[in-house]
Image (cartoon, rainbow, N blue to C red):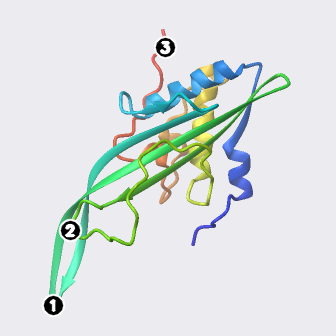
Amino acid sequence: MLPKKETPGQTVAASRFYPGKSIDQVRAASTEVLNLLAPGKMEFDADGPGIAAKRTYGYVERRMGYQGTMTTFYNVSMTAVSWYTVALSEEAGGTRARFALQTRADDQASYWANSAIPAIHRSFRHDLPLDGRQGIADLKLFHDRVEHVLGLRPTWVSCNEVKEPGKVVELCDNNGISDVGPARS
């Protein structure tokens, strides 16, 4: 069972200080990293004080059901939304950024939809809570990539560098995610 509250490890991994960088520089780098996750498919909300982004995508899930002694396999069209937020605050000597993500999938359009589960909230979400589902690898990977875009880290951190056997890294494993870093001239 996953913890319902933010863990101490998540608290540390979600927030990072970028020395010598302004809020605008960290905002631009964070936006670039999020855009690189799904080029051309990320939507941004410019009204918030930090960054709020979302990506909606579909996929087909293979399911299995039983009826009497017969096993049935069927495909269900799923819709998923991933939300990303970056809260930014200026501190002495630099900027602090706190990253959070959340993904929700449902099959409300399918015959087997559970009407007791509400449909996905499709608007932007600000100040996402961490609740145990977000892996520390996702949080660290985001910040490592922002450091690279800001010039604080020499190389782009790829998914292969953070993947552990049997662990899901949302920034690497969700449908339609790209692992390609920024083009450098």
Q: Residue furthest left?
A: 70
Q: Residue at x 68, y 52 (%)?
A: 10
Q: Residues within 10 Å of mark 3 (few under 14, many from 20)?
A: few
Q: Amino acid at mark 3?
A: Arg
Q: Position of residue 110 (x, y in %)?
A: 22, 63
Q: CA distance from mark 2 to mark 3?
A: 48 Å
Out of 74 and 83, give the one closest to the viewer: 83
3 or 1: tag closer to the N-terminus: 1
Q: From what the image shows, is residue 121 above or below residue 140?
A: below
Out of 76 and 9, give the one closest to the viewer: 76
Look at the numbered disc 2 and give the secondary structure of its residue. loop
Q: Residues within 10 Å of mark 2 (few under 14, many from 20)?
A: few
Q: Amino acid at mark 1?
A: Thr
Q: Position of residue 58 (x, y in %)?
A: 29, 48
Task: Report if the CB atoms under discs 2 and 1 are less than 8 Å apart.
Answer: no
Quadrant of residue 22 within the rendered picture: top right
Q: Residue at x 65, y 19 (%)?
A: 24
Res. 184 mark:
3
Q: Residue furthest bottom?
A: 68
Q: CA distance from mark 3 to mark 1?
A: 59 Å
Of badges 2 and 3, the one in the foreground is 2
Of badges 2 and 1, the one in the foreground is 2
Q: Residue furthest right?
A: 92
Q: Which residue is mark 2?
A: 111
Look at the numbered disc 1 and give the secondary structure of its residue. loop
Residue 93 placement, left or right of 80: right
Quadrant of residue 66 within the rendered picture: bottom left
Residue 119 placement, left or right of 70: right
2 or 3: tag closer to the N-terminus: 2
Res. 69 mark:
1
Q: CA distance from mark 2 to mark 1?
A: 22 Å
